[in-house]
Image (cartoon, helix red, strand yellow):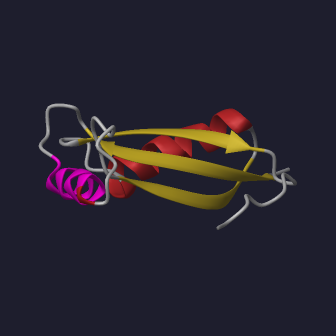
């Protein structure tokens, strides 16, 4: 029997990798008067829903998805969390 799992995946550049987009955003914030921003790193956020027999199986699949497609393991780190399949959708602004 399979269950439905929702996953939130966060992909970020490794700390040793330069982040020109983050630098540009930090500069833009400074021009807007936010001089107190000390650093910006830009990443990706992915939500997906998958079917798996267990949470451990879902986590294994997510690891492989991240390694093979969703993240570039040479320059990016990733982490993910499984959330309850019936959890309410997040609030958008």
The span shown in magenta is 19-30
Quarter of image, res 50: bottom right
Q: Residue at x 84, y 51 (%)?
A: 87
Q: Residue at x 85, y 50 (%)?
A: 1
Q: Residue at x 35, y 58 (%)?
A: 69
- Closer to us: 44 or 31: 31
Quarter of image, res 41: top left
Q: Is residue 12 found left or right of 27 in the rendered image?
A: right
Q: Residue at x 61, y 39 (%)?
A: 81
The C terminus - image quarter: bottom right
Residue 21 on the magenta segment: yes
Residue 80 on the magenta segment: no
Number of numbered discs: 0
Residue 25 % position (x, y): 26, 57
Q: Is residue 66 found left or right of 58 in the rendered image?
A: left
Residue 31 % position (x, y): 23, 59
Tell me which secondary structure the magenta stretch mostly adopts: helix
- Closer to us: 25 or 14: 25
Residue 84 % position (x, y): 81, 45
Residue 13 % position (x, y): 26, 43
Q: Is residue 45 found left or right of 55 in the rendered image?
A: left
- Closer to us: 72 or 50: 72
- Closer to us: 40 or 79: 40
């Amino acid at each position: 029997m399979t269950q439905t799992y929702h996953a939130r995946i966060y992909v970020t550049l490794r700390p040793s990798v330069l982040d020109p987009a983050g630098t540009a955003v930090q500069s833009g914030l400074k021009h807007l008067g936010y001089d107190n921003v000390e650093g910006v790193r830009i990443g990706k956020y992915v939500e997906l829903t998958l079917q798996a027999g267990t949470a451990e199986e879902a986590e294994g699949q997510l690891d492989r998805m991240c390694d093979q497609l969703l993240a570039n393991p040479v320059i990016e780190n990733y982490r993910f969390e499984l959330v309850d399949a019936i959890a309410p959708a997040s609030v958008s602004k």
